[in-house]
Amino acid sequence: MSGVSVELRGISVDYGERRVVNNVELRIEPGELVCLLGPNGAGKSTLLRAITGTIRPAAGTVLIDATPMAEYDRSTLARRMAVVPGQATVAFPIRVEELVALGRIPYEHPLLGARAADRAATTHAIERVGITHLLGRDVRELSLGERQLAVLAMTIAQGARLLLLDEPTVHLDLRHQVEVMELLRDLAHNDGVTVVAVLHDMTLTGHFFDRLVLINDGLLVADGPPDQVLTDALIREVFRVDPRLVRPA
């Protein structure tokens, strides 16, 4: 099964009277591994939320598999798209395995509930993310990093062909950052899942992602493989730092 294509046609997003994303044109092919990169306030997370449909653009159209987002019903979209937020919060008691199983809701029978295939997908996701040691724990009692891994497992259990992530490594230690990056690359390269993530870490993005989309002041300023985007000139211009301090090895 192939991934999902994403196309942004002239996307602009306003917060009040301020335009934070301005006329972005972008196409992401099925199975691509793409990072939206840029400084704080550049508009990259806003652009990601426009793709997820959680905010409505002031102008332009988001197409998922060549179909405008507005034409999808919630259930169909949930089978195609899974989202990992930057910081997941849980306000009620729920065990890790129960949280992961929520990813199967779009597939459950309305009367019979979870079936064998749903339970198998939940188990597979838990094992793939490597959180079997957290089973039985209340999600509210987990560290922020552990909670982030549990949410990632939930989205994998969802089985969507488009995975959208906002700073998925922000609360993780170095080992788990690398493991998550390896997992995302495996999902794209071996499972054909389309992966789009917002990240700040240039070392991680330069090493693991095939394509970087550089955003600054709401504009798309560069798009291509890491060696073409993370140039000395662009690092100086966009991030305003000495490239020798941040360039990936």
Image (cartoon, grey):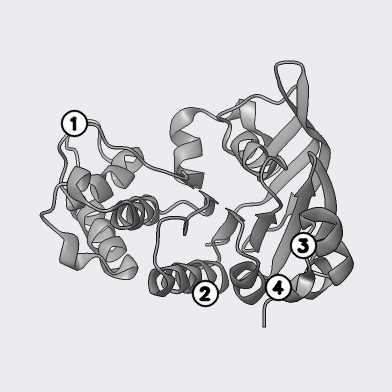
Quarter that holds the C terminus = bottom right
Disc on res. 190 = 2
- Closer mark to the observer between disc 4 and disc 1: 4
Disc on res. 245 = 4
Kindly state the secondary structure of the residue where label 3 is placed.
Answer: loop
Seen from the viewer's position, the closer of residues 237 and 88 is 237
The residue singled out by tag 3 in the image is 241
Which picture quadrant has residue 3? bottom right
Residue type indicated by callout 2 = Asn
Tell me the residue at 65%/63% (across/down).
32
Q: Are marks 3 and 4 in contact (CB under 8 Å)?
A: yes
Q: Are marks 4 and 1 in contact (CB under 8 Å)?
A: no
Residue type indicated by callout 3 = Val
Seen from the viewer's position, the closer of residues 178 and 112 is 178
Q: Which comes sooner in the sequence, label 2 or label 4? A: 2
Kindly state the secondary structure of the residue where label 4 is placed.
Answer: helix
Q: Which comes sooner in the sequence, label 3 or label 1? A: 1
Which picture quadrant has residue 59? top right
Q: Are marks 1 and 2 in contact (CB under 8 Å)?
A: no
Residue farthest to the bottom, as pictured: 249
The residue singled out by tag 1 in the image is 111
Q: Which comes sooner in the sequence, label 2 or label 3? A: 2
Q: Position of residue 149 (x, y in %)?
A: 34, 58
